[in-house]
Amino acid sequence: MGDWDLTSVGLVMIGSSITAAGTIIAALLLGITIPIAPYLLLTTALLIVISAFLILYGEQISNARK
């Protein structure tokens, strides 16, 4: 199994954050009341931004090593 680098961690984080946000939005569309939904969506948006920076930074490090 391969090593985990920053790009891999970023891809896992961004995928799980988008999945979590989609699940929250789907629950809201179905009429389920989630009192902390705005905070959860804000947290997932922040994780998506952090993940994007991890992916970009990991790619720069990877390209610099080549």
Image (cartoon, rainbow, N blue to C red):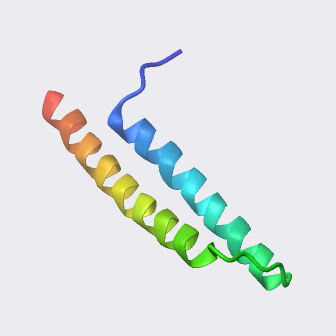
- Residue occupying the far front of the picture: 35
Q: Is residue 33 above or below residue 41?
A: below
* Position in image of residue 56 (x %, y %): 28, 51
The residue that appears at 34% across and 37% down in the rendered structure is 6
Above or below 63: residue 40: below
Q: Residue furthest top?
A: 1
Which residue is drawn at the image coordinates 42% and 45% (left, top)? Answer: 10
Residue drawn at the location 34% of the way across and 48% of the way down: 55
- Image quadrant holding the C terminus, namely top left
Can you tell which quarter of the image residue 60 is in? top left
Q: Quadrant of the N terminus?
A: top right
- Choose top left, top right, bottom left or bottom right for residue 18: bottom right
Total marks in image:
0
Q: Residue at point 31% right, 48% down?
A: 54
In this rendered view, identify the residue nearer to me: 22 or 60: 22
Q: Position of residue 27 (x, y in %)?
A: 79, 74
- Left or right, 48 with respect to 27, comes to left
Above or below — where is 40 with respect to 9?
Answer: below
Residue 44: x and y, percent? 51, 64
Q: Nearer the viewer, residue 44 or 5?
A: 44
Q: Is residue 1 visible?
A: yes
Image-based side of 59 in relation to 36, left or right: left
Foreground of the two, 15 or 37: 37
Relative to 33, 35 lies left or right: left
Question: Which residue is the extreme one toward the left?
Answer: 64
Q: In the figure, 48 relative to 28: above or below?
A: above
Q: Is residue 55 left or right of residue 38?
A: left
**Residue 53 in picture, x, y percent from top left:** 29, 55
Asked whether residue 66 appears in the rendered view, the answer is no
